Image (spheres, rainbow, N blue to C red):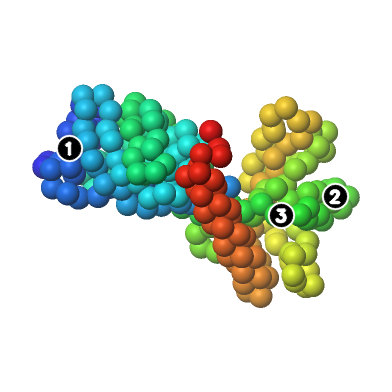
C-alpha cells in the first residue's frame, strides 16, 4: 500500500486503509484523555461500512469516548491522526461505531502528557520583577519533553501578566512539606469561559529534587484518576450512567 499525503487523504481513502486492518487482522491505536491523563489502547477493526467503522475497544477507551464524544485513530498506513465521533457505544461488548473520520485542523487535548489537577486547592505564589507577589490557585500541572514543567494557574482577568514575562513559582504539594520552586516564563494567557478569570500557563524548569517531587505527585494522581476511570466503567456496565 503506497504512501499518501495529508492533502490527498479523503474519507473514502481512510476507510480503505482501515479496511486493510480488518482484512489483515491488524489493530489500530486509539487516543483519548480522562481528567487530563492520556488513555491509549489498541482497538480491533470489526466492521467497515461506506460511512462508518465498527471497532472493538478497551473498556476504558469506551468510557473516554463517551465522555469526550470523540476519539483519535492512529494507523501506520495513514499519515496523521484521524478524529472520529461515536454513533453508538456498547459497553458490555466494548463495540463502538465511529463516523465522520477526518484529519482535524487542531487537537485541543494533550494526547501524550498527563495534565493533572489537584484534589484539594493548592495555592501558588507567583513573583516577578515588575509585580507584587500574587497567590493564585493551581489548575493543572504537567512535565513535558526535555523536563519542561508546565503549570496552569487561574488569574483574575484584571491582573496584568504579559506573555514571555519571567516569573517564579513557589508552592507545596500534598504529602510533601518541602517548598517546590519553578522558574519560567508566561507561556500563554487565555480567557476562561463563563468566568472573570484567565488561564495563566507558565513554562519553566525546577531543580532535580523539585522535579522528582512533581513527577511523584503526577504519578500518584494518575493512579487515582485511573481508579476513577475503572469505577466509571463499572457504573456504565451496570447501566447507572446514561
**Which residue shows up at 78% across the image and 69% down it?**
179
Element under disc 2: strand
User: Which residue occupies the extreme top position in the image?
Assistant: 51
Graded by Cα atoms within 10 Å as few (under 14), some (14 to 19) or many (20 or more), the crowding at tag 2 reads some
| Residue 132 image offset from top left, x and y in percent | 88, 50
Camera-nearest label, 2 or 1: 1
Graded by Cα atoms within 10 Å as few (under 14), some (14 to 19) or many (20 or more), the crowding at tag 3 reads few
| Residue 55 image offset from top left, x and y in percent | 29, 40
Q: Report the residue marked by disc 1.
A: 19
User: Which residue occupies the extreme front position in the image?
Assistant: 238
Question: Is 120 rendered above or below residue 22?
Answer: below
Quote the CA–CA distance across marks 2 and 3. Answer: 22 Å
Is residue 212 toward the left or the right of residue 17 in the image?
A: right
| Residue 4 appears anywhere in the view | no
Element under disc 3: loop
| Residue 161 appears anywhere in the view | yes
Q: Nearer the viewer, residue 219 or 63?
A: 63
**Which residue shows up at 67% across the image and 56% down it?**
184
Q: Are marks 2 and 1 in contact (CB under 8 Å)?
A: no
Q: Report the residue marked by disc 2.
A: 134
Quote the CA–CA distance across marks 2 and 1. Answer: 56 Å
| Residue 198 image offset from top left, x and y in percent | 73, 36
| Residue 49 image offset from top left, x and y in percent | 21, 28
**Which residue shows up at 28% across the image and 36% down it?**
54
| Dot placed on the residue nearer the N-terminal end, 3 or 1 | 1
Graded by Cα atoms within 10 Å as few (under 14), some (14 to 19) or many (20 or more), the crowding at tag 1 reads some
Q: Report the residue marked by disc 3.
A: 119
Q: Nearer the viewer, residue 6 or 193?
A: 193
Amino acid at each position: 500500500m503506497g504512501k499518501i499525503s495529508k492533502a490527498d487523504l479523503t474519507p473514502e481513502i481512510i476507510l480503505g486503509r482501515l479496511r486493510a486492518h480488518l482484512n489483515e487482522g491488524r489493530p489500530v491505536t486509539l487516543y483519548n484523555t480522562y481528567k487530563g491523563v492520556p488513555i491509549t489502547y489498541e482497538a480491533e477493526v470489526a466492521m467497515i461500512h461506506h460511512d462508518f467503522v465498527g471497532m472493538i475497544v478497551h473498556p476504558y477507551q469506551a468510557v473516554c469516548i463517551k465522555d469526550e464524544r470523540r476519539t483519535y485513530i492512529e494507523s501506520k498506513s495513514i499519515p496523521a491522526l484521524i478524529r472520529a465521533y461515536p454513533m453508538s457505544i456498547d459497553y458490555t461488548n466494548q463495540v463502538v461505531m465511529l463516523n465522520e473520520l477526518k484529519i482535524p485542523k487542531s487537537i485541543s487535548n494533550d494526547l501524550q502528557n498527563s495534565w493533572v489537577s489537584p484534589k484539594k486547592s493548592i495555592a501558588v505564589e507567583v513573583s516577578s520583577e515588575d509585580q507584587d507577589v500574587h497567590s493564585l490557585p493551581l489548575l493543572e500541572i504537567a512535565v513535558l519533553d526535555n523536563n519542561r514543567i508546565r503549570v496552569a494557574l487561574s488569574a483574575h482577568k484584571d491582573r496584568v501578566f504579559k506573555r514571555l514575562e519571567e516569573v517564579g513559582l513557589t508552592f507545596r504539594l500534598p504529602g510533601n512539606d518541602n517548598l517546590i520552586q519553578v522558574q519560567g516564563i508566561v507561556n500563554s494567557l487565555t480567557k476562561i469561559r463563563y468566568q472573570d478569570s484567565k488561564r495563566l500557563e507558565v513554562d519553566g524548569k525546577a531543580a532535580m529534587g523539585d522535579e522528582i517531587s512533581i513527577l511523584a505527585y503526577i504519578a500518584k494522581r494518575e493512579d487515582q484518576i485511573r481508579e476513577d476511570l475503572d469505577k466509571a466503567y463499572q457504573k456504565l456496565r451496570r447501566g447507572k450512567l446514561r
